[in-house]
Amino acid sequence: MKRLTYPAPHGSARDDAGIDVQVDEGITRAFQLLGKRWTGLVVSVLTAGPAYFSDLRRAIPGISERMLSNRLTELAVAELIVREVEEGPPLRVSYRLTVAGRALEPALKELSQWAKTHPAGDGAADCRARTSGEGSKTPGEQLP
């Protein structure tokens, strides 16, 4: 396991071997958008096909109308979804993924599978055990 030293100047870090390590630009861009609360859920729901605003709202428990509207606008600006207005009456608006948005589906499926395989808390318990010295060979000895 690589250990990074912190703080790192200019967004980079140097590991124990003296090698510069930086976060990937693509990962940075992806998480700047998809790392926002609700965004990944909206995209995930739309992988099933086009949906109306009200359908999205029902499919994502806890999201407010305002937040959903904001996330849909951000996704449209990022060209991951398309907003389509169906002339009335009644006037209806649906949303669907673009080719770029559909390209996220395999990554979202992988994340879903990862979350099922590694339930929340497993990593936190492991981290607590390492920092508290649980499981050490001698009292007070820290695990690597």
Image (cartoon, rainbow, N blue to C red):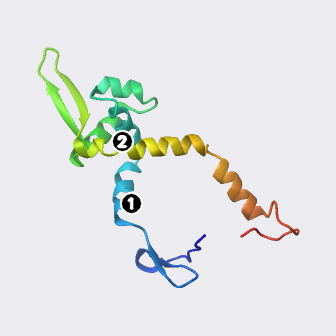
Q: Indicate which disc residue 27 carries.
A: 1
Q: Quadrant of residue 137?
A: bottom right
The kind of residue on which mark 2 rests is: Glu
In this orientation, which residue lies closer to the viewer: 141 or 57?
141
In this orientation, which residue lies closer to the viewer: 15 or 32?
15
Residue at the spot x=39%, y=66% of the render?
24
Quick check: 8 above or below 71? below
Q: Indicate which disc residue 130 carries.
A: none
Q: Quadrant of residue 23?
A: bottom left
Is residue 87 visible to us here? yes
Residue at the spot x=52%, y=76% of the render?
7
Mark 2 highlights which residue?
105
Label 2, residues with CA under 10 Å away: few <14, some 14-19, many ≥20: some
Quick check: 35 above or below 98? below
Residue at the spot x=27%, y=28% of the render?
50
**x then y, percent, for residue 77:** 22, 47
Alpha-carbon distance for marks 2 and 1? Answer: 16 Å
The kind of residue on which mark 1 rests is: Ile
**x then y, percent, for residue 11:** 42, 74
**x then y, percent, for residue 38:** 41, 40
Is residue 74 visible to us here? no
Quarter of the image with the C terminus is bottom right
**x then y, percent, for residue 34:** 38, 49
Would you say 49 lies left or right of 82 here? Answer: right
Q: Are marks 2 and 1 in contact (CB under 8 Å)?
A: no
Quick check: 75 above or below 47? below
Label 1, residues with CA under 10 Å away: few <14, some 14-19, many ≥20: few
